[in-house]
Image (tube, grey):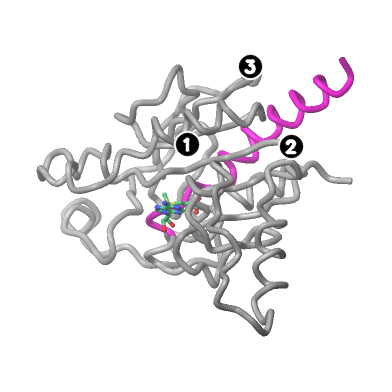
Amino acid sequence: MKPRLLDLYAGAGGAARGYQQAGFYVVGVDNKPQPHYAGDEFVQADALEVLRGDWPPYPSGDPSGHYHEIYYQLRRQVDLRRFDAIHASPPCQRYSLIARNTGVAGNHPDLVAATRELLVATGLPYVIENVKGSPLINPVKINGGSLGLGSGDMDLPRERHFELSFPFNGLIPPPSRQRRHSMGVYGHGTNAWHREKIGRNLRVAEMREAMGIDWMNRNELSQAIPPAYTELIGAQLLQHIQSERAA
Ligand SMILES: C[S@@+](CC[C@H](N)C(=O)[O-])C[C@H]1O[C@@H](n2cnc3c(N)ncnc32)[C@H](O)[C@@H]1O
């Protein structure tokens, strides 16, 4: 049986796909509907409530028992006792360079510390992913330039940081510049930066190719982690789980 990973703040599942590639069965949780989610199961719920296990009691105003089955099915899907590991990607807007430079960082929630505290309390191995500048502890840093990600004549640097509750024994080659330009996949539309650098807007097809994601729209891509990153982290996590089981 595959090890089971709970994917918190799941979005459309860039992280999920990488863990699947590493060999996990993945259940995603996001507080917004995610019709394109790429993991194996999806539950719409608040990530912190799932970690606390403090779902509201079964609603008393359901005399016909109509919601009974749905309610307990959802609770069972995210029952922490059924998982081997947890990944969490709290929203990064609070820590991103763009938000800090434009002075709007304070409008976004600071969820890293609250999420970490609850993850530690589960006793399960965990990964917290976020952007450069986020308050992660001794993170492993992955840059698309280390994995050859890009499209056409553009590299995809997209540095992301991963705090791990277990040792990382892998090798990440230093990022190298292989193409003439760099690309950034963020925001909701086209942006002036690309028009200035490469003389035109980025196409969604180029973003998909560079990220290694063929199922997301522009908004979903701008939030996602390239699956190659979590495939690498997932391989280490799998090794850790297997060595703990063998011990
Ligand atoms: C950075 S994106 C996740 C990207 C995703 N890991 C991927 O690789 O495609 C953060 C997600 O957190 C979700 N989110 C924000 N607050 C949340 C909460 N309290 N509980 C669950 N999900 C939340 C947002 O809807 C968004 O989809």
Between the residue at mark 1 and the residue at mark 2, the CA separation in whole angstroms equals 18 Å
Disc 1 designates what residue? 129
Tell me, yes or no, whether the two marked residues, 1 and 2, touch with CB atoms within 8 Å: no
Whichever of callouts 1 and 3 sits on the residue coming sooner in the sequence is 1
Q: Is residue 42 above or below residue 53?
A: below
Quarter of the image for the C terminus: give it.
top right
Q: Give the main secondary structure of the magenta stretch.
A: helix
Residue, far bottom:
64
Between the residue at mark 2 and the residue at mark 3, the CA separation in whole angstroms equals 16 Å
Residue at 69 percent of width and 27 percent of height = 236
Q: Is mark 1 within 8 Å of ligand 1?
A: yes
Instruction: From the image, state whether disc 2 or disc 3 is nearer to you.
Output: 2
Tell me, yes or no, whether the two marked residues, 1 and 3, touch with CB atoms within 8 Å: no
Residue at 28 percent of width and 64 percent of height = 188
Amino acid tagged 3: Pro
Amino acid tagged 2: Asp
**Percent position of residue 218, x then y:** 39, 66
Whichever of callouts 1 and 2 sits on the residue coming sooner in the sequence is 2
Q: Name the quadrant containing residue 175.
A: top left
Q: Nearer the viewer, residue 77 or 163?
A: 77
Disc 2 designates what residue? 84
Between the residue at mark 1 and the residue at mark 3, the CA separation in whole angstroms equals 15 Å
Disc 3 designates what residue? 167
Please provide the residue range marked out in magenta. Answer: 221-247
